[in-house]
Image (cartoon, rainbow, N blue to C red):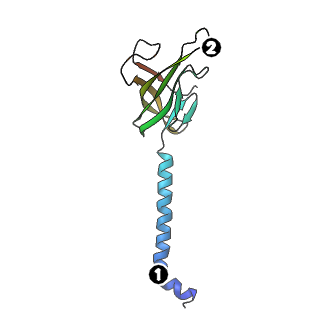
Amino acid sequence: MKNFKELRRSKGWVVILATVVGLSFGTYTFVNRAVTTQVYVTNCGMQEYKPDSITQYCADAGVTVDSIEWESWSKDGALGKGIYHVNDCEPSCYEGKFHEADVEIRLSKVKTINGKPTLTFIKITTKDKKNLPLETTPINQWPLELAG
């Protein structure tokens, strides 16, 4: 059996050291790139990554898209599908009934907010191209930017 001094001078030691250094650097690069290229969306004043719901009116959640399944997500935009819900507020918003429709979702307009790339605009279109519930068009869209 070789002692530590002999092992230190052998080629096997160099290969093991190079492997450990290479794996460490590769892991660091992968994790760092994943964190710095992650894209967010603003949702009721918070930055979120691939949320499963997005709300238009945060005070009463009168218009919401939920059950979102994202098909693509990048700084160039995001595409997904979900269910649009709107409250008819009859006789009041507390007692109102929610109406729904299957929709396609498109997020766009990336801006840097709090140092993070963030999608700041949403466009919703009904899958069947019929009007959204309580609307006169199959499309609803609004800015998602953080207040302030």
Location of residue 53 in the rendering, given as x and y in whole percent from the top left corner: 53, 31
* Label 1: which secondary element: helix
Given residues 55 and 40, the one toward you in this image is 55
Given residues 83 and 37, the one toward you in this image is 83
Given residues 11 and 51, the one toward you in this image is 51
Q: Is residue 77 above or below residue 31?
A: above
Mark 1, residues whose alpha carbon is within 10 Å: few (<14), some, or many (≥20)? few
* Label 2: which secondary element: loop
Mark 2, residues whose alpha carbon is within 10 Å: few (<14), some, or many (≥20)? few
Q: Is residue 133 above or below residue 47?
A: above
Location of residue 96 in the rendering, given as x and y in whole percent from the top left corner: 59, 14
| Residue at the image position 46 percent from the left and 36 percent from the top | 69
The kind of residue on which mark 2 rests is: Glu
In the image, farthest residue toward the bottom: 1
| Residue at the image position 56 percent from the left and 87 percent from the top | 5
Question: In the rendered view of the protein, which quadrant contains the N terminus?
Answer: bottom right
Location of residue 139 in the rendering, given as x and y in whole percent from the top left corner: 40, 19
**Earlier residue among tags 2 and 1:** 1
Q: Is residue 29 above or below residue 100?
A: below
Which residue is denoted by mark 1 in the rendering?
12
| Residue at the image position 52 percent from the left and 85 percent from the top | 7
* Camera-side mark, 2 or 1: 2
In the image, farthest residue toward the left: 129
Location of residue 91 in the rendering, given as x and y in whole percent from the top left corner: 60, 8
Which residue is denoted by mark 2 in the rendering?
95
| Residue at the image position 37 percent from the left and 17 percent from the top | 130
Cα–Cα span, label 2 and label 1:
75 Å
